[in-house]
Amino acid sequence: MISSFSPRAFLLGMLTLLALFGPLHAMSLSASATQPGFFGDAADSDTAAAATATDERLVRGKVVAVDPTRNRITLEYRPIPQHFLEGGTRIFDVAQTVALKGLSAGDNVRFDVERDGRRYIVIRLENSN
């Protein structure tokens, strides 16, 4: 016997899946974002109130590699919601006005990017070591 599609059963099944897996996903995101030492978060609570409007756009990251000859930097970074980027590691082009001098792998940085077609370009970069 072939069963017919039941919208009510489908909806109930979807709600059950969301109830089971939704909290697990939220817990994994909050656990990694609040882990002590994750991109220097220990000081975040102290300095959050003092952030200016321009600093709110800055994203915390860690330098993985610097390529000054090609004007690129590889960063491990947090999610960038204004550009719909999940956190991860990426090679970014760097604007000509941004200096890469003095940066090396392992440095903690704060940065801002802008989108240019398919590329993301670092337009502001601060060493936060």
Image: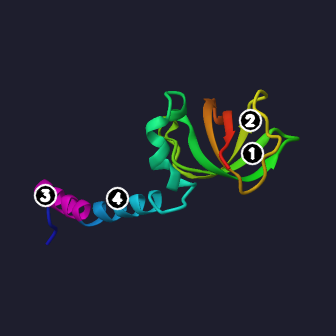
* First reached walking from the N terminus: tag 1 or tag 4: 4
Considering the numbered disc 2 on the image, is that residue within a helix, a strand or a loop?
strand
Asked whether 67 or 120 is in front, the reply is: 67
**Which residue was labeled with disc 3?**
6
Q: Residues within 10 Å of mark 4 (few under 14, many from 20)?
A: few
Q: CA distance from mark 4 to mark 3?
A: 30 Å
Q: Amino acid at mark 3?
A: Ser
Q: Quadrant of residue 58?
A: top right
Q: Is residue 87 above or below residue 93?
A: below
Q: Range of the magenta residues?
A: 6-19
The majority secondary structure of the magenta stretch comes to helix
* First reached walking from the N terminus: tag 1 or tag 2: 1
Q: CA distance from mark 4 to mark 2?
A: 33 Å
Nearer mark to the viewer, of 4 and 3:
4
Q: Amino acid at mark 4?
A: Ala
**Which residue was labeled with disc 4?**
26
